[in-house]
Image: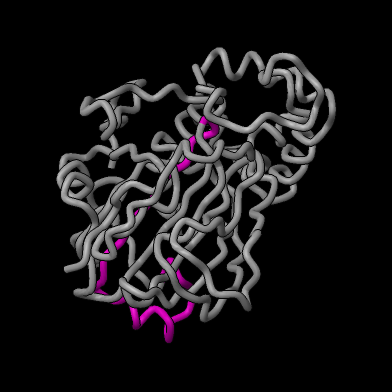
């Protein structure tokens, strides 16, 4: 659901500025080659398997990769003053990260993001570009007309999927330039967690236009959460091209609090998907409106992303 269809641009609505903006895409030349050209489509499997992504992710851990950090910050105008410095001694925080991955999983400084406290409002679980639907069914087209997502395909467990049939759906797309830690949207506990093996295709809108089944074919980790205010949620982290690893930092046998970190993605853009039980909540109004108009909504971590029905 983006405006990238026939143009070289990806546009999204920025809730903070109230304006439509154009996304600065990292690695757009490779994505367009792999998904828009005949040669790229022929060799695509060499880039979308887990071994390539893990090897590329390991490269981002090398000390030499720290040289990429400052140019990346400057090119994509990242407000590095909002983040904690790395572990490398340096006068300038842009030079303080020992590797690109250490920069990639940087944390916000205390107080730079806050989570909505109204119990009737769900907090944004990632700093990302969102699309959302009141109910997941054959009318929920994503990313292009004629394609849709169903709970059973995303969750890969027919029995569990029945809980979420006809319920709301949120898709949060994280770009390589974004904060790459993801959080819990409410207080609660983990009921179940499992991994679904799969490919590592890009989740970039350019890729989604040409390979619509990415979200149900990529590797993903599924957590079933029992929350205090929004019932049960299926919380799904989706792997993508060059994502070296999906790391869970929260212990399964512990309850969690709204805003508490759940985990992070190592290098690469990726996606978090959340499904809910029918009739308990719905995505925020601007997300619903923008999704129907074919555009994503960019939110800061912790802002309202949904509301009780």
- Which percent across, then down, holds residue 269? 54, 39
Residue that appears at 50% across and 76% down: 189
- Residue at image location 48% in from the left, 39% down from the top: 111
Query: Which residue is rendered at x = 52% and y = 28% of the image?
Result: 82
Identify the coloring: one colour
Q: Split into 4 quadrants, where in the image is the C terminus? A: bottom left
The relative height of residue 197 versus residue 20 in the rendered view (above or below) is: below
Q: Is residue 281 left or right of residue 254?
A: left
Asked whether 282 or 290 is in front, the reply is 282
Number of marks: 0
**Residue ranking furthest to the front:** 111
Residue drawn at 81 percent across, 23 percent down: 89
Is residue 138 at all visible to an observer of this figure?
no
The spot of residue 303 in percent (x, y) is 33, 46
Asked whether, in this view, residue 206 is left or right of residue 51, the answer is left
From the viewer's side, name the closer residue of 33 and 25.
25
Find out whether residue 174 is within the magenta segment.
yes
Is residue 71 or residue 183 the one in the foreground?
A: 183
Q: Nearer the viewer, residue 56 or 288?
A: 288
Q: Which quarter of the rendered picture does the N terminus lie within?
A: top left
Which image quarter: residue 299?
top left
- Asked if the magenta segment contains residue 75, the reply would be no
| In the rendered image, the vertical position of residue 84 relative to residue 271, given as above or below | above
Q: Residue at the bottom extreme?
A: 159
Q: Is residue 188 above or below residue 56?
A: below
Residue extending farthest to the right is 63
Q: Which residues are magenta?
A: 153-177
Residue 290 in the image: x percent, y percent?
19, 41
Q: Is residue 18 visible?
A: yes
Point out residue 78 in the picture as x, y percentages from the top left corner. 51, 22
């Amino acid at each position: 659901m983006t405006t990238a269809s026939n143009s070289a641009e990806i546009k999204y609505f920025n809730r903070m500025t109230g304006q439509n903006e154009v996304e600065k895409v990292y690695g757009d030349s490779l994505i367009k080659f792999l998904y828009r050209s005949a040669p790229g489509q022929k060799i695509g499997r060499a880039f979308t398997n887990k071994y390539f992504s893990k090897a590329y992710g390991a490269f981002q851990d090398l000390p030499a990769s720290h040289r990429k950090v400052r140019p990346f910050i400057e090119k994509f105008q990242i407000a590095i003053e909002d983040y904690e410095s790395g572990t490398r001694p340096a006068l300038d925080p842009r030079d303080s990260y020992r590797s690109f991955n250490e920069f990639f999983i940087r944390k916000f400084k205390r107080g730079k993001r806050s989570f909505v406290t109204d119990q009737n409002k769900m907090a944004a679980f990632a700093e990302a570009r969102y699309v959302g639907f009141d109910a997941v069914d054959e009318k929920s087209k994503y990313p292009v007309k004629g394609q849709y997502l169903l709970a059973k395909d995303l969750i890969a467990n027919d029995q569990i999927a029945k809980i979420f049939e006809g319920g709301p759906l949120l898709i949060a797309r994280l770009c390589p330039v974004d904060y790459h830690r993801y959080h819990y949207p409410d207080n609660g506990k983990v009921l179940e967690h499992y991994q679904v093996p799969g490919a590592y295709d890009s989740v970039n809108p350019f890729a989604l236009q040409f390979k619509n089944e990415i979200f149900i074919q990529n590797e993903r980790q599924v957590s079933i959460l029992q929350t205090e205010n929004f019932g049960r949620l299926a919380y799904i982290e989706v792997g993508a091209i060059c994502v070296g690893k999906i790391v869970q930092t929260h212990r399964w046998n512990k309850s969690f609090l709204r805003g508490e970190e759940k985990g992070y993605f190592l290098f690469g853009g990726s996606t978090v998907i959340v499904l809910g039980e029918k009739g308990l909540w719905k995505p925020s109004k601007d997300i619903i409106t923008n999704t129907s108009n074919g555009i994503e909504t960019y939110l800061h971590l912790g802002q309202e992303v949904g509301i009780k029905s």
